Image (cartoon, rainbow, N blue to C red):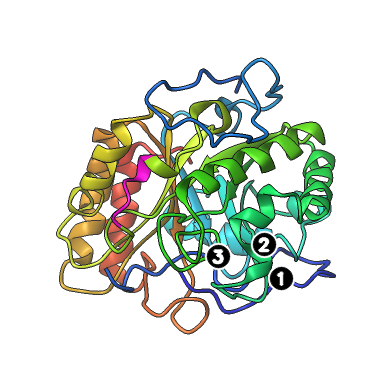
Amino acid sequence: MRRATILGVAAVAAITLAGLAGREAERPASGHAQNPGTPAPASGAASPSPETRTAAARPEDVLRNGPVFGVNTLHTDPASIETIATATGCRPGWVEVFSAVTGGVSAAQLAALPGVPLLALEPWQDGKVNDPRWTLASTINGAHDAEYRRIAAEIRAYGKPLLLRFAHEMNGAWYPWGPVGKNTPAQYREAWRHVVRLFDEAGATNALWVWSPNIVRGAVRTPIREFYPGDDVVDFVGLTGYGEFEANPDATYKSTLDQLDSFTSKPLILTEVGVRPSKAKTGWLTAFGPWLRAHPRIAGFVWSMRPPGQGSRYDWRYDDSPANLAAFTGSLRKAGAAC
């Protein structure tokens, strides 16, 4: 989803947006065992292995007894999150924030969030898609290692488990780490493993890595599995997926989940969720809870709560009408959401 604000290098308050951070659905259409069905990393990659990685954080450290409700919202202060908790009857457990690698992150910013941080870390600068400074090759060859090490040091200083959604939506041609220019899926896998190695070497093993493609609608035709770096360097699989005019979540996600099921059994997070206003929206929201209950592999979801004109073109929010808010809160109960 396109974002409006940018995180500056000297930001000292709350983490805000970093240029474009995710794709809106309307655009065209620990110690882990390696999954033998996933592509091997490209030759010469600096690749962690199950024997060398030390996973201080475990997926269960950020999970609850039921799917976790998370939010991506303009205001991440405790009072704003409390307002969401009051309106829905469910306190968000995860708070998603975005930062460009060039913007940096601080331990203090992470600690100020009222929930487990889900940090979307974006390897780019100035919102440029075709930027020769930020090709996948530039990450692989170490051009940005110093910036990654600074971020890793802050995450290590934060100390608690967090979710790290690195270089998301890599199967869409709208980011410089996607299939644009001379980038290849093999390079994406190698770049991912390179950055994981840097964080491990820095002792930032409290980061849980979230590999987060876009749903297949609107993405490139390359099978998702070709971008997958391997079970040994992924803790969660994430998905960006917005309801358009489908009648229910199954219609939105099924074709993508079928692909994922063919090569990994990692727990899933819907890292960006929302529903576009239409006659189908209330029904989609009503069906969301039963659908989550029928898909226990989905460990949680992050709802996009940014109003139109402030990071979003459409109103993806669940509370754009009283009927939709009621449908969503009912779904939270039916899903057995962890509140």
The numbered disc on residue 7 is: 1
Quadrant for the N terminus in the image: bottom left
Are the residues at dot 3 and dot 2 in contact (C-beta closer than 8 Å)?
A: no
Q: Residues within 10 Å of mark 1 (few under 14, many from 20)?
A: many
CA distance separating discs 2 and 1: 6 Å
The numbered disc on residue 99 is: 2
Q: List x then y, in percent, for residue 320.
A: 35, 73
Q: Which residues are magenta?
A: 221-225
SS category of the residue bearing label 1: loop
Q: Residue at x 33, y 59 (%)?
A: 220
Q: Nearer the viewer, mark 3 or mark 1?
A: 3
Is residue 136 in sight in this rendering? yes
Q: Residue at x 67, y 48 (%)?
A: 140
Q: Residues within 10 Å of mark 3 (few under 14, many from 20)?
A: many
CA distance separating discs 3 and 2: 15 Å
SS category of the residue bearing label 3: loop
Q: Nearer the viewer, mark 3 or mark 2?
A: 3
The numbered disc on residue 176 is: 3
Question: Which kind of residue does numbered mark 2 sit on?
Answer: Ser
Q: List x then y, in percent, for residue 155.
A: 77, 44
Q: Left or right: 62 with respect to 329? A: right
Q: List x then y, in percent, for residue 285.
A: 26, 57
Magenta stretch, main secondary structure class: loop
Give the vertical position of 36 relative to 308 (above or below). above
Q: Residue at x 60, y 64 (%)?
A: 80
Which badge, 3 or 2, comes first in the chain's sequence? 2
Are the residues at dot 2 and dot 1 in contact (C-beta closer than 8 Å)?
A: yes
Magenta stretch encompasses residue 180: no
